[in-house]
Amino acid sequence: MVLSNASADLEDADKRFHFHSQTDPARHAETGPLMIVRGEGPHVIDIDGRKYLDAVASLWCASLGFSNARLAAAGAAALETLPVYHTFNHRSNPFVAELAAELATIVPIPGGRMFFTDGGSEAVDTMVKMAWYYHSAIGQPERRKIIARTGAFHGSTVMAARISGLPAMHKSFNLPDCNVIHTARPHYYRDALEGETQADFSARLARELDALILAEGPETIAAFIAEPVMGAGGVIVPPEGYFPAIHEVVKRHGILYLSDEIICGFGRTGSWFGCETFGVQPDLMSIAKGLSSGYAPIGGVVVSAPVFEAISEESGRNGLFSHGFTYSGHPVSAAISVEALRIYKEMDLPAVSRSLGRKLAAGLQRIASHPLVGDVRSVGFIGGVELVADKATRQSFPAELKVGAMVERRTRAHGLIVRNVGDVIAICPPYIVTEDEVEFLVTRLARALDDVHAELQTG
Ligand code: PMP
């Protein structure tokens, strides 16, 4: 079938033949797609020629925007010289070797080794399998359980979805048990007790985690996993002292600490990696998204030296480390990632993130007084705006009103793309935006909030 380029034909094809990710199929059959056809700096353009500032960088990943010529050239050069090759059984290629070495200069795990995957969910599954393998290697195979947090998002493969703590990821899928336990998310605005300070709240969550580990039996627990800032769970910035307190508990019980840096990695929180911003050193760290600025699918796991050494010894006894993917270390994705890392270093990405982040934080403070806004939060260049029905009581809107989605639709009418995760508006722009574009983002979001406020009042 040859489609004309006419928008109606393409939209019709998409409605009839494409089963969309993370989408309501029945609603899609009615509304059809938002068909994005082109990118220009931090903007994307739809099939009808409308231009949007993409304030969520595609899906938290297009760090360098949508038309970086150096990334395109790096990808094209790799396509022309070595479009595909695998890394099983000692095979390698120059791009992946260089990428591993480049990463080694910025990761906060001294002596870290880089394992590559096709994307984030595979990286998370890989961390869990490595944690199990490590504990077998050191003679503690009974350490099987994984502790994750309510509200977490770690991906959509079976294990990544199982450890995710968002109800919609579980509903109707009947996922197997997989020895997963959830502990409380660090959502100060929603979950702190009356009069509890941030430090008190953090200390309480650490005590609760300790009690949970003791009740389960520390000798049964393999790993604890956390996103530094919870993304899809509502852009939850951890309260003061949270991560050091949690990390201390985890390490005291001989449990591996896994940092899911798939959103927070590569500058987002104002340091190269989120665990640095919050002062903890993980044993394993998942990366994806910003690694290639989203230009090609790639993810990975950074493995600390002690874990790597134990896994290597066990692999020697087993004949090999029997885990990996056809596209692990794919030359085109690796070449693009090498170039992305070079550009990040040249622009001093963490400093850019902190500087743009100050502008964003000031803008969000202005929005905080809006009647629909209960809380604004940000760190580095990531932010969230939590919508509420009642500012004083923090009462949420009924979920079926889908107020977050209403705001998201209205922002598009004002030339802006944001992401609503429930009733939280997530902001995670490309780092190439100007301060004026951050101002545009804030004023257009405020207009969308005004529109929705008026709409809700008129019923
Ligand atoms: N972990 C986190 C924190 C994420 O935000 C995501 C994706 N949004 C994933 C894992 C899964 O990554 P992917 O969609 O590339 O599989």
Image (cartoon, helix red, strand yellow):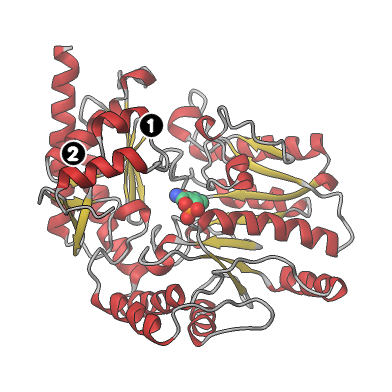
Q: Give the foreground label among 2 and 1.
A: 1
Please state which of residues 80 and 301 is positioned toward the viewer in this rendering: 80
**Which quarter of the rendered picture does the C terminus lie within?**
top left
Please state which of residues 432 and 39 is positioned toward the viewer in this rendering: 39
Mark identifier at residue 196:
none
Taking the spot 75% from the left edge, 70% from the top edge, the residue there is 321
Q: Position of residue 298 (x, y in %)?
A: 48, 66
Q: Is residue 293 above or below residue 210?
A: below
Could you classify mark 1 by the number of other residues whose Cα lies within 10 Å: few (under 14), some (14-19), or many (20 or more)? few
Please tell me which of labels 2 and 1 falls first in the chain.
1
Please state which of residues 387 and 64 is positioned toward the viewer in this rendering: 64
Please state which of residues 255 and 132 is positioned toward the viewer in this rendering: 132
Identity of the amino acid at label 1? Answer: Asp
Q: Name the residue that disc number 1 marks.
A: 24
Image quadrant in which you'd find residue 210: top right
Q: CA distance from mark 2 to mark 1?
A: 20 Å
Q: Position of residue 206 (x, y in %)?
A: 65, 41
- At mark 2, the secondary structure is helix
Would residue 168 be visible to someone looking at this image?
yes
Q: Is residue 302 above or below residue 165?
A: below
Mark identifier at residue 411:
2
Q: Is residue 133 left or right of residue 176?
A: right
Judged from this view, the residue extending furthest toward the front is 1
Taking the spot 39% from the left edge, 75% from the top edge, the residue there is 336
Tell me if the residue at label 1 has its CB under 8 Å from ligand 1. no
Could you classify mark 2 by the number of other residues whose Cα lies within 10 Å: few (under 14), some (14-19), or many (20 or more)? many
- At mark 1, the secondary structure is loop
Q: Is residue 384 left or right of residue 281?
A: left
Q: Verify CB contact (< 8 Å) between mark 2 and mark 1.
A: no
Taking the spot 41% from the left edge, 87% from the top edge, the residue there is 81
Identity of the amino acid at label 2? Answer: Thr
Q: Is residue 227 above or below residue 317?
A: above
